[in-house]
Each structure stands twice: as structure tokens, then as C-alpha cells.
Image (cartoon, helix red, strand yellow):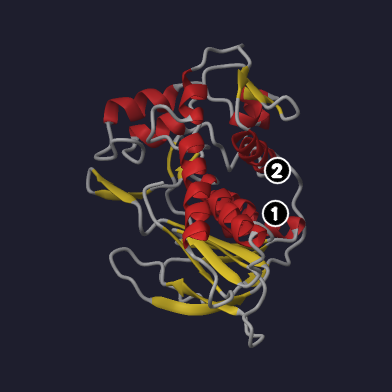
């Protein structure tokens, strides 16, 4: 997935590590083989190449992630959209990442777009997918979180309950440490080109994910663009928060909602987080986040970005 994973845990001192290490590696390799946009032979890329209207069989893990992604897409009114793969590539964040391609970005931006939760049909029981219109799927906003959950599953299947596993900015903690203390996770200061902790979050039996505009960036015509695509404007998000951190039961959910709330912003995103009982921290540019808080604003009227165009 273009990054590294880590697993810290407590176990018996004489436990053989080779088998456990292999199981952890295999779990993330399976996610990568199924969901990577950087591997032409991945199951996701085969689905992207499939013609419209044809049912395509997919592995159980990919079907699980697709189902979760489509649900977050619906619940967020399209703020989280896995159907922006062509925009991701055009802006230089996809395979062969580099400088944005102005012609490709312009072409992708004028296409009449339908969010993925309206463009594809998923039969979860039969584990098959059918596209109703051309769409390029990208699971970068959710697959790493699922990979973290898979690392946790492996450890728990081996009887290990006290752990902290992570892939990039997504983490999941198991039970507290033997001394009863929670796992301490540094919250990074959201500044481009500068790495320092702004605070510490203590978690146990929970997952954290952070999305921000200060790490994966491209420079284009004198401006800096973060990697989060705004489906409303068919381009990288502008004038959004510096970062969003979400605490949830699973890393997959935290990962997807961090992206969705990044697009929605503090006002609408905070209202939706409150309605969904998500704990979220919005960090604005120039602020020093120190802890998580739960949004408490009233639940918003449910309204999709796409209702006006695709009702």
C-alpha cells in the first residue's frame, strides 16, 4: 500500500514469532493484492476494467470494503466517494504519481459524474459487483483502515488482546496494557514540511484515523494541493480543515469517515458526526489540537450533494 505497517503487543515471552509475523504479513498482502490501484492485476483494477452492465465476482474481503464504502458514501451525501479514481490519477496522486496532468484533470472534471453508491450495484450475498455506468474506483480512503482491522483480527485469532496496530495514519488499539494504562498515540501537528506532536490521545478498544492536507501533496501552478478529492468540485479539496481525526469502533469506519468529514468541513461535518455519534477532532490551519472532542451540535437535515442533479 505504499507504506509500512506496525504491530506492538504483549504476549508470552517464549511465543514463536515467525508464524505470527507471517500471518500479519499475509493479512496486509491480501488487502494489497485485492484493493491496490498500483497493481494492475489487483481485483479492484480488474473491476475497473470490466464493462458496464456485467456482474463481476469479487473476493469476500473486497466485497466487505465496497459495502462499507458505499454505505459511508450514502450516509455522507457523497462526500466520501470511491468513484473518483480518474480524478486521483489526473491530479498526480495515483499510480505513477507525479505532477498533475492539466488535460486529464480538465477532462475528468467535465464528465457528468454520479457518486459510486449510485453508479455501482453490489450483491453482498453472492459477492459480485455490477457497474451501471463507467466509473473508476479508488479505495485509498478506506482500504488501509481495513488492513489495520485485519492486523487486529490476526492478533486476536492468536489469543493476543493487548495490542496497537497501524498502517500509515490509521491505528487500532486492543485491550489496555497489562498495567491497566491505555495506549498513547501522538497527534501530529498539521503543518506541511514540519513533523512534531501537538498532543497525545489515549485509546483502548478503539480505532483512530486522521486525514489531512499537509503530507501527500502536489504543486501545481504555484499552489499546493492535498490528496483529498472533493467530489463536489471534481478537484482536490481547497479551503478545508488542516486535518480531521476520527475515533470509531473499527479502523475501516474511522478511515472512511475521516475523509468524508474532511470534505464536509467543521460545520456540516460536525453536525453529521454528532448525528452518527462519532468522536471527531477538526484541526484548522494555525491551531494546536490537543484532544478529541465529541460533536454536540444538532443533527442536520439529511441532504445529499447529488440530490439536485440526480434526484
Circle 1 packing at 10 Å, graded few (<14), some (14-19), many (20+), is: many
Q: On screen, 307 above or below 160?
A: above
Q: Position of residue 127 (x, y in %)?
A: 68, 27
Q: Position of residue 131 (x, y in %)?
A: 60, 19
Quadrant in which residue 236 is drawn: top left
Q: Secondary structure at mark 2?
A: helix
Identify the residue shown where x is 47% and y is 52%: 25
Quadrant in which residue 36 is drawn: top left
**Depth check: 308 or 99 in front?**
99
The disc at residue 112 is none
Identify the residue shown where x is 36% and y is 37%: 94
Q: Is residue 172 left or right of residue 278?
A: left
Q: Is residue 187 visible?
A: yes
The quadrant of the picture occupied by the C terminus is top right
Identify the residue shown where x is 27% and y is 49%: 223
Q: Which residue is mark 2?
A: 75
**Disc 1 and disc 2 in contact, CB within 8 angstroms:** yes
Quadrant in which residue 273 is drawn: bottom right
Counting residues from the start of the chain, the first of labels 1 and 2 encountered is 2
Disc 1 versus disc 2: nearer the observer = 2
Distance from Cα at disc 1 to Cα at disc 2: 9 Å
Q: Which residue is mark 1?
A: 272
Q: On screen, 133 above or below 8?
A: above
Q: Is residue 291 visible?
A: no
Residue at the extreme bottom of the image, as rendered: 179
Amino acid at each position: 500500500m505504499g507504506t509500512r505497517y506496525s504491530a506492538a503487543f504483549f504476549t508470552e515471552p517464549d511465543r514463536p514469532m515467525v508464524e505470527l509475523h507471517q500471518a500479519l504479513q499475509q493479512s496486509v498482502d491480501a488487502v494489497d493484492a485485492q484493493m491496490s490501484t498500483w497493481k494492475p492485476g489487483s481485483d479492484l483494477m480488474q473491476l475497473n476494467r470490466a464493462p458496464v452492465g456485467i456482474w463481476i465476482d469479487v473476493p469476500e474481503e473486497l466485497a466487505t470494503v465496497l459495502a462499507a464504502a458505499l454505505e459511508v458514501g450514502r450516509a455522507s451525501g457523497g462526500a466520501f466517494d470511491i468513484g473518483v479514481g480518474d480524478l486521483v490519477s489526473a491530479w498526480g496522486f495515483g499510480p505513477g504519481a507525479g505532477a498533475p496532468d492539466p488535460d486529464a484533470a480538465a477532462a475528468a472534471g467535465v464528465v457528468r459524474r454520479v457518486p459510486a453508491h449510485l453508479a455501482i450495484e453490489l450483491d453482498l450475498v453472492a459477492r459480485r459487483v455490477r457497474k451501471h455506468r463507467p466509473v473508476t474506483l479508488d479505495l485509498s480512503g478506506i482500504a488501509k483502515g481495513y488492513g489495520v482491522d485485519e492486523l487486529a483480527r490476526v492478533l486476536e485469532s492468536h489469543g493476543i488482546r493487548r495490542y496497537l496496530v497501524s498502517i500509515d495514519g490509521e491505528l487500532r488499539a486492543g485491550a489496555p496494557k497489562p498495567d491497566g494504562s491505555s495506549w498513547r498515540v501522538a497527534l501530529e501537528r498539521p503543518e506541511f514540511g514540519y513533523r512534531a506532536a501537538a498532543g497525545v490521545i489515549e485509546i483502548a478498544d478503539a480505532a483512530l484515523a486522521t486525514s489531512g492536507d499537509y503530507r501527500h501533496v502536489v504543486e501545481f501552478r504555484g499552489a499546493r494541493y492535498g490528496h483529498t478529492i472533493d467530489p463536489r468540485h471534481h478537484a482536490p479539496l481547497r479551503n478545508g480543515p488542516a486535518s480531521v481525526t476520527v475515533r470509531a469502533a473499527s479502523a475501516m469506519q474511522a478511515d472512511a469517515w475521516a475523509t468524508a468529514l474532511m470534505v464536509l468541513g467543521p460545520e456540516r461535518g460536525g453536525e453529521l458526526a454528532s448525528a452518527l455519534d462519532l468522536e471527531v477532532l477538526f484541526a484548522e490551519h494555525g491551531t494546536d489540537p490537543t484532544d478529541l472532542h465529541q460533536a454536540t451540535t444538532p443533527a442536520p437535515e439529511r441532504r445529499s450533494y447529488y440530490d439536485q442533479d440526480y434526484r
